[in-house]
Image (cartoon, grey):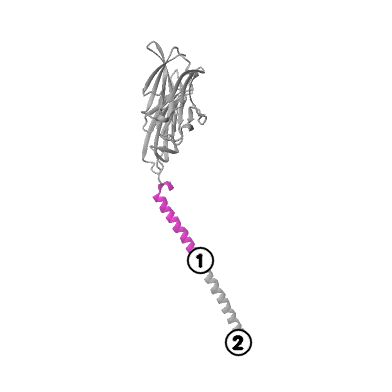
Amino acid sequence: MKVILILLFALINTSCNNSKLNELNKRISTLEKNNVTLLDSIQQYQKELEKKKTKDTFWTNKEKYDEGTSYFKVIPHDSVFFGNYFTKETTYSIKHISLDDTNGVFIAKYITETKGSIQSEGTEKNIKIELSHFDKPNNILYNIEKECHQIELENKIYKTYQFGCCLEKDIYEFYDYSNKSIVKSNLKIISSLIPNSNIDFYVGYEIDQKEKNSDFYSGTLTFAYDNSDKYIIKTFGNKKHDWFNSELDIISNSKKDYKIEEDFETVFNIWSLNEIRDKENVNEITLILKINDKIVLKIPIINGKPFGKNDRIHKIKLEI
């Protein structure tokens, strides 16, 4: 009887242990199944992401849209000159600008070639720019190439700056994106911006010390809306003047208008003409040329034109 009880107890105990073991195995199986499901989900997500990267080449390093080169070269010297060098640099920039009445994000590729010498302060630069839409970088929309030291890309126009060495004059020039010149100047260009309007104008003054017809040819003032709608005022001085002390200025009859002086440009915000739609409404603006702080020329803008006249070219003799 005692032996039977012991066997029965052992059987019951074994049965309980088997039940717990079965329950444990079920739980382990469930966990393993869940882990496999989670792992499958992660792997599936990674596969879908890789497919997206393959379709959208901006997300993969397998393809490059462009690979520019840069290098530095020392030019062999002769018995007189030494220390000449040449550099080529390729850089990229993202531009948020408006071109041809279209706003967008563009990629600008700059290729800058520089010639210089350790014996000279000045350098010669050639800048090439390839401009394309951000989402189509291989489709070049605009090509720019200028001999200058700096180019700024802005809405509807770009600006070039050539800095004179020693006694040479600086040359500033603004272009549209068809590479047509709008205005050129040796003095700060005046950019006159009219808020909430598509009418802007630019003023520049080129200094040319050439003798012509017994009068000393002084320079050319340009008043321009764009590359074709512009007015030229040729000025003749009675003596050679110091162009270092020449200054181009603009004033208006309204306190709403104000100027911002930048390094190579004067920006004139004409709030008094806010929202105008016709150039004939550009009034009460005066252009001023100063030499040695003396006003030698005043040009009133009347009905959108210098002196209110339709003449595209004017000739004025200055008493300097």
Q: Which mark is residue 32?
A: 1
Amino acid type, callout 1: Glu
Look at 38% across and 20% down and name the residue there. 314
Compared to 4, does 179 lie above or below? above
Amino acid at pointer 2: Ile
x and y, in percent, of residue 243 in the image: 47, 18
Q: In 3D space, how far apart are the residues under numbered discs 2 and 1 (Cα atoms)?
A: 41 Å
Q: Position of residue 164 (x, y in %)?
A: 46, 22
Regarding mark 2 in the picture, which secondary structure is present there? helix
Residue at the top extreme? 214
Residue at image mark 2: 4
- Whether residue 75 is visible to the viewer of this picture, yes or no, is no
Span of residues in magenta: 37-59
Task: Give the vertical position of 71 relative to 213 (above or below).
Answer: below
Out of 305 and 83, give the one closest to the viewer. Answer: 305
Name, please, the residue furthest toward the bottom.
1
**Residue 291 drawn above or below residue 224:** above
The percent coordinates of residue 217 (x first, y second) are: 41, 15
Q: Secondary structure at mark 1?
A: helix
The foreground one among 202 and 144 is 202
The nearer-to-camera label among 2 and 1 is 1
Quadrant of the rendering where the N terminus is positioned: bottom right
Q: Are marks 2 and 1 in contact (CB under 8 Å)?
A: no
